[in-house]
Image: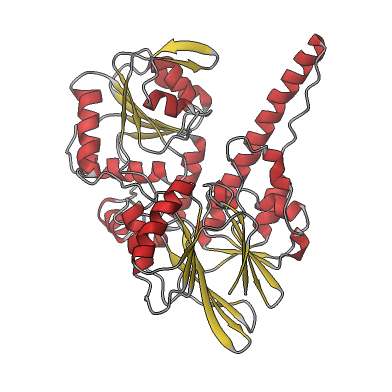
Amino acid sequence: MKLTVWGAAEQVTGSMHLLEINNYKILVDCGLDHESGVDLGANENFPFSPADINLVVLTHAHIDHSGNIPTLVKAGFDGQILCTFPTADLTQLLLSDSVNIFLRKQEKSKGRKKFNRRKGHSNSNSQPLYLYKHVNDAADRMVPIAYHKPFKINNEITLTLIPTGHLLGAAAVHFTVIEDGETKTIAFTGDIGRKDYPVLNNPEYLPATQYLVCESTYGGRYHSDTEKLKDVLIKTIKEACIDQPGRLIIPAFSVGRTQSLVFSLNKIFSDRELPPIPVFVDSPMATMATDIYRKHQAYVSEESRSFYKKNGDEFEFENLSYVKELKESREISDHFEPCIIISSAGMLEGGRIQDHLFNNIQNFYATIFFIGFCAKGTLGSRLLRGDSIVNIKGRELSVFASIKKTDLLSGHGDHGDIMDYITNIPQNSLKQVFLVHGELESMKALKADLNEKNIEVAIPKKGLTFEM
């Protein structure tokens, strides 16, 4: 049995791990590499022949885990893609959105090319990495399987999907392998969620596992635990919309974060802990993702299901509106009563959120409330670090709006959560942990703590092969 880490090695994006068992090749995840300085087109250059891959197993739908699957299919992969039922639906939604982004970039590139030709300069055209056809081809290869039900791949390999929280349908992949008469076990965590996260079930511990390929996103970092999410939301809404007649603008990722936020607000307003305040979810993609959450009600948390039985749809309440048309989105700017606007994208890089920022960043009575991570270099990160002037839609604008944040809606487990997850594997079974999907300093912090517990840890370089 051989393991080669071809993505997310000492970095966060581009998860892609090759498992070889008796000449049978399994790719666990196939994500887009979005690291700074990496040309998106480089994702076409696989370090193996896609046609030689027998099977793909997908841990969850996020683009850094799923986003290069259509490229793999386009390049010759013709096997099955195993994942949970929600992951299949959410992945198709996210991959289709990726095509939209590629096509918009292509149009902008064409405009720049025409401009540069007039100036006597050359400019290469930005070709889409893949198109809707390739997304549909990938969707046709998806074979959804249930949690906890062993799936026999062949006489030597069986896999089981185990819930990890993080996103609807997210799963760790646990393999049981018979090789040369010996039984071996290896698991891939994907991304590990948090306990008591709105809408999602808690991550479940793995059974006996000899080798573990584990994410390390929040290694060395801890989430805030001094306040409860409900209290933070109530306090922020009161300050932004009730104590003064203002607007609360919340950038949120359309898939996952928005649904957890809406459910949390639903509980607050249903319990009448705040007076009714108009809430606008301004993201067509968030609306479609919410429909997928409704479809897969069996996969949401017990709390969410109980709320549904008692109060009805957990993603719908009296003062909530889902904004679909762009005309409706623009009309929100004319809504002068206090309101809450939830819009994408979460890091403020594109999407309808930029329109709301453009119209409100100089409004003393507006509050921008961040509920997720913003990568360095994004507009969100510049606002969070306190820049007094930012460029939005080509204009330099002074920042008069209040800027606030919380990490209580982060979908990733922190250092303590990851340690808890690993150390609850029966220790007489665990032989080695491979840390992936994290910055090097995060990996080193986890490795130091795991070594203290006498757990052997490797931090793989990209392309390095381990024999087990």
The location of residue 74, given as percent across then percent down, is 76, 52
Q: Is residue 204 at all visible to an observer of this figure?
A: no
Q: Quadrant of the N terminus?
A: bottom right
For image coordinates 51% across by 22% down, the residue present is: 327
For image coordinates 58% across by 36% down, the residue present is: 36
The location of residue 266, given as percent across then percent down, is 28, 42
The location of residue 366, given as percent across then percent down, is 32, 19
For image coordinates 34% across by 42% down, the residue present is: 261
Quadrant position of residue 19: bottom right
Q: How many marks?
A: 0
Left or right of residue 247: residue 275: left
Color theme of the render: secondary structure
User: Which of the two residues, 269 or 129, is positioned nearer the viewer here?
Assistant: 129
User: Which of the two residues, 63 or 303, is positioned nearer the viewer here?
Assistant: 63
Q: Is residue 424 at all visible to an observer of this figure?
A: yes
Left or right of residue 130: residue 335: left
Left or right of residue 94: residue 404: left
Quadrant position of residue 207: bottom left
For image coordinates 44% across by 11% down, the residue present is: 397
Q: Quadrant of the C terminus?
A: bottom right
User: Which of the two residues, 217 or 251, is positioned nearer the viewer here?
Assistant: 217
Quadrant position of residue 363: top left
Above or below residue 236? Residue 201 is: below
Above or below residue 466? Residue 367 is: above
The location of residue 362, given as percent across then percent down, is 37, 12
